[in-house]
Amino acid sequence: MTVDRILPSDEAHDLLELATELADRELAPKVVEYERRGEFPREVLRTLGRAGLLGLPYPEEYGGAAQPYEVYLQVLEILASRWLGVAEAVSVHTLSCHPVATFGSEQQRKLLPDMIGGELLGAYCLSEPQGGSDAASLNTRAVRDGDSYVVTGTKAWITHAQVADFYNIFCRTGGPGSRGISCLLADRATPGILPQAAERTMGLRSSPVAQVVFDEARVPADRLIGDAGAGFTIAMSALDSGRLGIAACAVGLAQAALDYAVDYARQREQFGKAIIDFQGLGFILADLATQISAARALTLSAARLRDAGRPYSIEAAKAKLFATDVAMRVTVEAVQVLGGAGYVADHPVERYLREAKVLQIVEGTNQIQRLVISRALAKG
């Protein structure tokens, strides 16, 4: 299905055409085999970086494209419609560049061209085994020792854990609570940084997720991003943007599932006519198409607030909540439309269903999104 898009510039139109071309050529033909093998497509990420698609929202002076977030999210949607694992990798990497790009020193920002160009891949180390949603209670500690911080602790559910070139480490440098948290930028080669074996996940098998152990890892003090104690603010700022990225991924995945289900329903005949002509099924598809359009509109509306420099945290939470719930609903129904065929790996909808579930969990569970929204309502 062709999505009717209103774009802010001719350059944005060209970027979406480029994203579509690359997605069709570099992503769609490879996704099945990479997912089957559980192999991370590092070269695909480099290709996207060299094409300028990893630095879309970042300034041109650092090698970015200075594009509105509205445009970046539509590129992400296109990538997700061909291969969610790659789109999620782009979203996580863009999130990983945010601390340096927004809060980093001029010296730290010299790393940005290689980061957003795709030569250096990032990981975002916030969650821990005992603390995911309650990020302010994290236990990983960094103690100042001369011109270094010595980091000890364990992070969990880290995308790119084994393949990242740099890590944003959110760690406790002060007392309890959010004000005691700082953010350090560490190189992969730092002694004492120990990525663990990859988790065996339900979906997104081409996207490595694992714990990362920090065993007295020494990170230079000049790799402190922002001020000591500013880490929680940095983390939440990045997550607001990251939630929009996940919402866009959800829209792309849902659109792919709907398109496949519609094509199947138009070709599959029962009782002498295409099954899409049976009202019971056609109405389901109509509702799904409407919900996807609503999710896309909500996501891009939040992005426009961000682009205008206006508060958007609550709208990002709404977009992430709604879009990922829609993706789950659409993929479940897509399997149902195909019937028994939808339950086998010969058709991609069974993979779409397995992948959709994680989108309701990452970048803050949907229960956390509801908590964010309800607290805002309570405050008036």
Image (tube, rainbow, N blue to C red):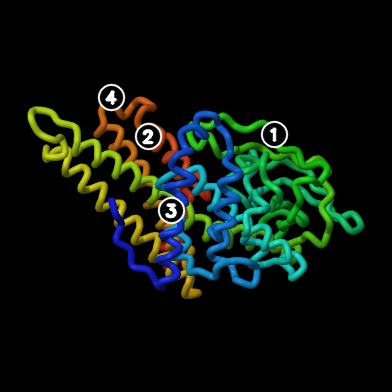
Is tag 2's residue or tag 3's residue first in the polypeptide sequence?
3
Mark 2 touching mark 4, by CB under 8 A? no
Q: Earlier in the sequence, mark 1 or mark 2?
A: 1
Q: Residue at x 63, y 33 (%)?
A: 198
**SS assignment at label 2:** loop
Q: Name the residue that disc number 3 marks.
A: 21
Residue at image point 54% right, 65% down? 57
Where disc 1 sits, the SS reads loop
Q: Earlier in the sequence, mark 3 or mark 4?
A: 3
Residue 348 marker? 2
Q: Amino acid at mark 2?
A: Pro
Disc 4 crowd rating (10 Å Cα; few below 14, some 14-19, many 20+) is few
Q: Residue furthest left?
A: 272
Residue at 55% x, 58% y is 51
Q: How far apart in space, not on screen, are marks 1 and 4 (Cα)?
A: 38 Å
**How far is the residue under mark 2 from the one under mark 4?**
13 Å
Q: CA distance from mark 2 to mark 3?
A: 20 Å
Can residue 6 be seen here? The reply is: yes
* Location of the C terminus (image quadrant): bottom left
Residue type, label 3: Glu
Q: Quadrant of residue 109?
A: bottom right
Label 3 crowd bin: few (<14), some (14–19), many (20+), radius 10 Å:
few
